[in-house]
Image (cartoon, rainbow, N blue to C red):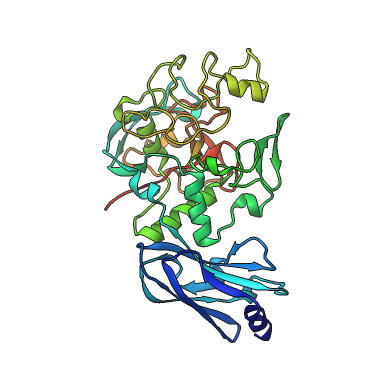
Amino acid sequence: MKLITALLLFGSMYASAQSIQHVDYKIDNDQVVVDYDLVDGGAQNISLQYSINNSLWKSVPLHACNGDLGVVETGKGKRIVWLPLTHLENLSGQLKVRVYGTNLPQSINTSMLLVKGGLFPMGNLQGKEDEKPIRYVKINNFYISKFEVTVSDFRAFVNATGYKTDAEKKGGSYIFNGERWETKKGINWRFDPSGSPRSDMEDNHPVVHVSWNDAQAYCNWLKNATGKTYRLPTEAEWEYVAGNADKHTKFSWGNYQPFNIRVSNLADENTASVLKWTKSSDRIFWGYQDGFVFTAPVGSYTPNDLGVHDLTGNVAEWCSDWYSINYYNQNQKDNPLGPAKGHSKIVRGGSWESSPKETLTSSRDYHTPDFRSCFIGFRICYTEH
């Protein structure tokens, strides 16, 4: 307790926004008790952050504090209780603490589209074995995000919670280093597909280097923050939307191969030059250029018939289901949720580096829940009951 007291006496505490006022603290045994008022501007994502010896600000982990943090409505008499010794081994030096507030990510709340349910033929007789047989599946009404989750959206989540991704905890993420594919240490959601740090100009690009676990944590945060049951789409919901409902088109833009019309961010001739693929490769949409080598800002291309962007290409997207090669044989017809258990999670849609076959609406991919790479992101949905 004496050590914490000394540090705070030589440190400082302040708010990050004008709407956070009257910030004060006191020491109670091994706890730091922070009081503040949130006076205007509507609800905010509130986190407690700290800096030691003028280091970069870090968010206090959720397990080390409780009280009025996360999504907090306006009002007086807010309180956060922090237990520094539960996660800080070295407290030597000057400690600074701030109450940090960010606006709720409006892009999430305003970009959800109602998808009216229906019946559609799921699968592809000309596809891989795990896409067979075709079965007619019924989907109920649900809401899906118009865009893929962006770097800006994910940053709001991290700032509010202090969350650490699998890439940060488990040794980096999978990238193409200019010569070969490799897992590179230090790469996380703050980096682009090439492994370079994202600039502020790329906040509207889809977030990558995130695992299924990370995407699920994001959904859980949104669910707690808003009261809506945000989740990842099921595999069947995803294919229903990507194929334009009962039309079940080959790609989200239709049934034709793209040439002169920019329909999506795909493995084009720009990508081929960077990844050193030759004209003999079947991984490229030859004769097509989408204007980007790696990811494109979300919404850069015309949406599909349902108003949803980037379902084919840009980044592949995590779904909620476990993967099974024989699942279609089980003939689950009404809002199928996938197998009850498994080893890998479904990934759909293909990305900026995926082959034409891999970007078909019916194509299925899968990875372990902790896998992260430069070509997988996610979008969200929810169902009203």
Residue sitting at 57 percent across and 31 percent down? 294
Q: Which residue is the extreme one toward the front?
A: 18
Q: Position of residue 278 (x, y in %)?
A: 65, 15
Q: Is residue 257 above or below residue 30?
A: above
In the image, 157 versus 280, the foreground residue is 157
Q: Is residue 42 above or below residue 297?
A: below
- The quarter holding residue 300 reads top left
In the image, 32 versus 119, the foreground residue is 32
Figure disc tally:
0
Q: Is residue 263 above or below residue 115?
A: above
Is residue 341 visible to the viewer in this orientation of the structure?
A: no
Q: Quadrant of the N terminus?
A: bottom right
Is residue 356 visible to the viewer in this orientation of the structure?
A: yes
Residue sitting at 70 percent across and 72 percent down? 89
Residue sitting at 55 percent across and 21 percent down? 268
User: In this rendering, would 150 be left or right of 198?
Assistant: left
Q: Position of residue 114 (x, y in %)?
A: 28, 41
In the image, 174 versus 325, the foreground residue is 174
Residue sitting at 67 percent across and 63 percent down? 55
User: In this rendering, would 360 be left or right of 177?
Assistant: left
Q: Position of residue 57 (x, y in %)?
A: 61, 62
